[in-house]
Image: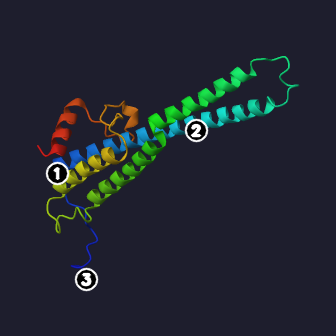
Amino acid sequence: VREIVRLDRLPGKTSLEGLSLVQEAWCEYDVAMYLANRYKLISKLLFALQLIIGWAVVVVGTSSSKPQLFTRWEHWKDVLFALTVSATLIMSIDALFNAKARWRQLRSAAGSLEGIIFLYRTRVEPFDSKIEGDPEAQLRDALVRWREDLIASGDLQLSALMKTYPAHVYRHHQHPSRSEERTVSNLSRGE
């Protein structure tokens, strides 16, 4: 039974490469969640603006059918036109940012990355060294695939994924220093 069931999969030690890759993964998780929250805020604000402007168009449009309300004010047609142009502009900005899709993709990718990190840290499949081989190489490959999938599937090539962010973005306190950034990026490339 002890051979079949391994209760303790945690390794006795983790290599420097593994620690660096986990640090890099947590940094990327934090950046993905930060950007997801930012895109979520943009998405919600643009939606709220669309609702407010749409409501204003309906109010002005229906009120214009009652001539007693607009007998003294002659610019209601201009206001109605400006509101419809504003609504079109807000919809165009929303389509340009594509904030809702980016928010969802980043949030999903961050959850996937968190799963990869925990699978590696607990050394379960596919990172079990007894079954597959070198867990650090598998983690490096998993991180590379994760990045490629994230950039390809979420229209995120235009966003600032690889930018250096202030320390408050890194919630897991894994902010890489300048010298560590070069080491970590070299490790993720397999150099």
The residue under label 3 is which amino acid type?
Val
Mark 2: few/some/many CA within 10 Å (<14, 14-19, 20+): some
Mark number displayed over residue 15:
1
Q: Is residue 191 left or right of residue 1?
A: left
Residue topped by disc 2: 47
Query: 25 or 2: which is nearer to us?
Result: 25
Q: Secondary structure at mark 2?
A: helix
Q: Earlier in the sequence, mark 1 or mark 2?
A: 1
- The image position of residue 88, as x and y in percent, is 57, 31
Mark number displayed over residue 1:
3
Mark number displayed over residue 168:
none
For residue 188, which quarter of the picture?
top left
Q: CA distance from mark 1 to mark 2?
A: 48 Å
Q: Secondary structure at mark 1?
A: loop
Q: Secondary structure at mark 3?
A: loop
Q: Dividing the image into 4 quarters, which one contains the N terminus?
A: bottom left
- The image position of residue 20, as x and y in percent, is 21, 45
Q: CA distance from mark 3 to mark 2?
A: 58 Å
The residue under label 2 is which amino acid type?
Phe
Mark 1: few/some/many CA within 10 Å (<14, 14-19, 20+): few
Q: Mark 3 touching mark 2, by CB under 8 A?
A: no
Of tags 1 and 2, which is closer to the observer? 2
Q: Is residue 65 left or right of residue 125?
A: right
The residue under label 1 is which amino acid type?
Ser
Q: Earlier in the sequence, mark 1 or mark 3?
A: 3
Q: CA distance from mark 1 to mark 3?
A: 30 Å
Identity of the residue drawn at 25% across and 32% down: 177
